[in-house]
Image (tube, helix red, strand yellow):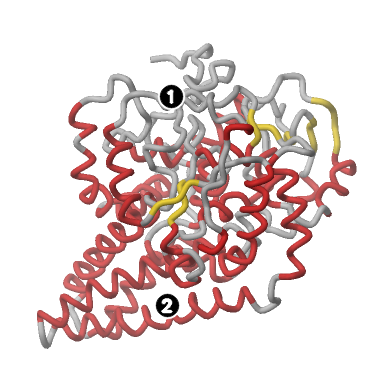
Amino acid sequence: MAPDPDRRQVSFPKLKYPNNRIDEPRTPQMWLHEKQLQDGAEGLWRIHDDLYNFTDFIKSHPGGSQWIECTKGTDITEQFETHHLKGIAETLLPNYFVRKAKLPRNQPFTFKEHGFYKSLKVKICGMMSEIPSDARRKSDFVTDALLVTLLISSPLCCWVWTKNFVFAGALTIFNGFILSSLTTCAHNYFHRADNWRMYLFNLSGMSYSQWRISHSMSHHMHTNTAQDMEIAMLEPFLQYIPYSDKPIWAQMAAFYWPVIFTFSVITVALKDHIAGIFNLGGAKYQWQLVLTFVLPLWMWLLGGLSLPWTIALWIVTLLITGLVFTTYGLTAGHHSHRNFFEGDIPREQDLDWGLHQLDTIVERIDYAGNHFKSITRFGDHALHHLFPTLDHAELKYLYPTLLEHCEKFEAELKMNTFYEALISQSKQLIRKRPNDFRNKKSNEYHCVVNNNKR
């Protein structure tokens, strides 16, 4: 069927719907291509209603070339506003200005100077000097320790399978948890400027460069909207959007989601490799995808198992990793029945991006202040979404400012425990009726979080 150019989003009917949202193989490159067609960037880079030509800036971009190179022809307003905290980027923009855009933005989000997000950003920037200078070393230490543990436990697991099945089974589960934790830690790094630890994400079989698009650019910037690629990638098996005609078998996912989660990582890995090899959906095979095979090769060389059994053990490890990684990832805050999703009624058609993030997040209170849990289980998720380039070790110092800001704007930072998040996720998979956020005006917000929790 030919794309319908007049198709509109449900929650924001004035905005165009991404026509290839459900087209396989749903690659990040397809998502970018659709944005190029709808963003009105005219082959340049769009920020708000202005067009810029960053061609000469690609190689000198401090964050790395990918962020600029792959977004040519798209609207990068959300990325620009949330990824630059020092005010330097704004001073450089006039050097690359070309002209005003002809079409209005195909996004509902605003970044008004005295709005919730921009004023919070000013406060956070002013606080950066108060954060301990060695805070990021804590994340580096946890990540490096997990990497060393994985390098020891993986071949050891192979060797133990030749000695004792019970101990080997337990060690295999442990290995899956370690790989999951390391993968989540690596996620902390691919949000930032290029660095060697971001490559550790590929040990899981997935691609950090693909996730920079599907996760950092799509999910983080357009959370739970029609532009959120991570919601689309789960369908039709997990239908988090409250479709009015959601079939009963899809609602039953409230019970069978662990099966889908288990195969999630290995499925994404296969899709990335196949799409890259056969150039499906605009994808290209990149050298860093080869890092996928470093772990099984390491296990085979040092573990003492035959190659077929090593591969089988590696696959089992990826299955365990998929269950753990996705369980923590999809209960990190966005998949609650209390949150906003495409299909719900938004508070207004033009809304502050930061307030939208609060509408799509329920923070897990039982991870509060625990750096290890935060960096290995997608904790401190509200501040991570609001300021994705900050290290997870830095976030806990910023919560008093966030809570004070919530109180000023009478905004709500919703909270639950991990186990409540599991139940709430199941309720969202069942939900068919839209939530109405129109009553969440600023004068009706209440900050319900006790500062002592942090």
Q: Nearer the viewer, residue 361 or 289?
A: 361
Q: Is residue 169 left or right of residue 107?
A: left
The residue to which callout 2 is attached is 146
Q: Nearer the viewer, residue 222 or 340?
A: 340
Which amino acid lies under the numbered mark 2 shown in the image of this protein? Leu
Residue 228 appears at what percent x and percent y? 48, 37
Looking at the picture, does residue 344 appear above or below residue 237? Answer: above
* Identity of the residue drawn at 47% across and 60% down: 379
Mark 2 or mark 1, whichever is nearer to me? 1
**Nearer to me, 412 or 135:** 412
Residue 237 is tagged as none
Q: Is residue 148 left or right of residue 303?
A: right
The crowd level at tag 2 (other Cα within 10 Å; few <14, some 14-19, many 20+) is: many
Q: Is residue 342 above or below residue 197?
A: above
Which picture quadrant has residue 176? Answer: bottom left
Q: Which residue matches tag 1?
A: 343
Above or below, 390 relative to 73: below
Residue at the image point whose x is 58% and y is 31% from the top: 35
